[in-house]
Image: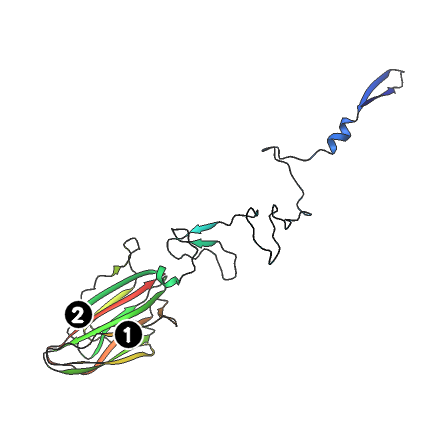
Amino acid sequence: MASEVALSDNNGVKTTLMRSSTVATEMNQPRVNPASGAQLVEASGLSPGVSATQLGKAEDAVAASGDVGVFQLGVRRDVPTISTSAAGDYSEMAVTRHGAIYTQAVDGMKRTYSAGFKVTPVAGTVLEIIGAATTTVEVNRITATLFGTAAGKVDLVVNKRSAVSTAGTAITAPAKVPYDSADAAAVTTIKGFTAAPTLSGLVGLVRQAMLYCGASIPSDRLKIESGGYAKSFTLTSATQTLTVEIGGTIPAGAELALDVEWTEY
């Protein structure tokens, strides 16, 4: 609906203007996004509702076929990854490559490696496991088997230390084998010795055991484990180490077989 408005200037010239109600009507039209054409809605007063066709649901409400809700998305993580910058931050749900939410024990998803070797043992350190500067290393298992052409008994201890050994005669570095071929190369250092190194930085003894072998009869395989219901032996820097040291009666013709299993993340 329109109406006329007549205007006159000082010289008596009249001008007629048309006034339309369209102006007032357009002011009440919904606002739209000029790029997409989508209607803009003030969200401050919106409620998600609680009915079957609304996004919100009440606490303890019974689920029913056809209920509407928001689809929750998860992010595929083939290996455990720190996806937030600090504890207490919001994070996405992580899922496996099969779409399952990570609810299993995380240890089974860490990069896992093993190394083994055999040495002619002498009293002192026969194995040193050295951590890395930017990677957390968890030592899960150390195993040892003693053989000699004569009977003998050795005492074996595992010590945690805050300094890397010096001197000594190390064997050729054993291969560090990943359990998953897709994993990156291990950064943990594994050293075996045929002449004991000089040690320092003792933190404390974490395990002790004995190995006995008969003449040309190997000992039972000694298995030293950590983790499970408690933390594993954990190394968080390049100066933290675990050492395996032996003493006692080392038999003639002795050989000591050692292997290590660890994870990195």
Could you say which quadrant of the image residue 176 lies in? Answer: bottom left
**Residue 260 pos. (x, y %):** 26, 68
Picture quadrant where residue 183 is located: bottom left
**Secondary-structure class at tag 1:** strand
Query: Which of label 1 and label 2 is nearer to you?
Result: 1
Q: Quadrant of the C terminus?
A: bottom left
Residue 230 percent location from the top left of the image: 39, 72
Query: Which is more N-terminal, label 2 or label 1?
Result: 2
Relative placement, left or right, of 205 versus 153 is: right
Q: Which residue is drawn at 19% across and 80% down?
A: 123
Labelled disc at residue 224: 1
Going by the numbered disc 1, the residue's amino acid type is: Ile
Label 1 Cα crowd, 10 Å radius (few <14 / some 14-19 / many 20+): some
Residue 153 versus residue 136: which sits nearer the camera?
153
Q: Residue furthest bottom?
A: 248
The residue to which callout 2 is attached is: 118
How many numbered marks, from 0 up?
2
Crowding around mark 2 (Cα neighbors within 10 Å: few <14, some 14 to 19, many 20+) is some
Residue type at mark 2 is: Lys
Residue 193 location, x and y as percent?
20, 72
Label 1 to label 2: alpha-carbon separation? 17 Å
Could you tell me which quadrant the N terminus lies in? top right
Residue positioned 39% across, 62% down in the render: 106
Label 2 residue SS = strand
Answer left or right for 91 relative to 30. Answer: left
Query: In the picture provided, is 30 more to the left or to the right than 60?
Result: right
Seen as rendered, the residue at the extreme front is 65
Mark 1 touching mark 2, by CB under 8 A? no
Location of residue 234 (image quadrant): bottom left
